[in-house]
Image (cartoon, helix red, strand yellow):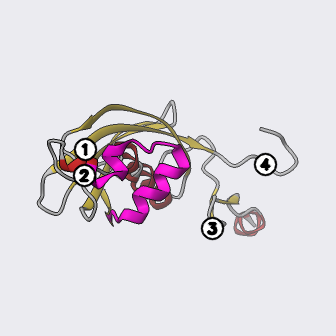
Amino acid sequence: MDAMILSQNPPARKENHLGEEREACGMGSLHFEIGKKFTLTKTFAESDVYLFAGIIGDLFPAHVNEEYCKRMPYGTRLVHGCLTFSLCSTVSGMAGVDSGHDILAMGYDQVKFLKPVFFGDTITATYWITEVNEARRKTTGQCVMTNQRGETVLTCLHYMKVIDPVEEGKGP
């Protein structure tokens, strides 16, 4: 009889932000593997920089004027620091997808731009969870970005919050 009751009440299931069905997490344990690494590699092209400059309105000559840059210490145009930094958002999201949880970025800390990034540089962003706070449903992660020469160009800490889908018919 107990088996029949259990089969009539399977574990609650919900869809995550990708539409994938999973067991509802509720206030249960978080499924993040501390230290598991996620990577994203991107080569920054001139078109990436010009599109980003147009979106944010930052047309400072260091990013868009090669002649101006020839007189500057680096001698060529630089990728916007915020464009490089934006890779952290994507690579940290991979940890959320891997865990099966829906997540929101809560902030960044100790952002350090250590070396310039130039047009044509290939940047690899590596992210891993360093701490999980079950009670507050938050994680802390580290993001490190390196160029094609293995030089570290950016580091930061990242904070995420696990959110649970709202039950249908109920508001946030």
Whether residue 99 can be seen here: no
Disc 2 target residue: 117
Disc 1 target residue: 154
Q: Residues within 10 Å of mark 1 (few under 14, many from 20)?
A: many
Amino acid at circle 1: Leu
15 in magenta: no
Amino acid at circle 4: Glu
Q: Name which of mark 2 and mark 1 comes first in the sequence.
A: 2
Which residue is pictured at 76% across the width and 63% down the height? 5
Which residue is pictured at 34% across the width and 49% down the height? 63
Q: Are marks 3 and 1 in contact (CB under 8 Å)?
A: no
Disc 3 target residue: 20
Q: Are marks 2 and 1 in contact (CB under 8 Å)?
A: no
Which residue is pictured at 48% across the width and 46% down the height? 30
Which is more foreground, mark 4 or mark 1?
1
Quadrant in which the N terminus is drawn = bottom right
Which is more foreground, mark 4 or mark 2?
2
Mark 4 to mark 1 CA distance (whole Å):
39 Å
Q: Name which of mark 3 and mark 4 comes first in the sequence.
A: 3
Q: Are marks 3 and 2 in contact (CB under 8 Å)?
A: no
Whether residue 102 can be seen here: yes
Mark 3 to mark 1 CA distance (whole Å):
33 Å
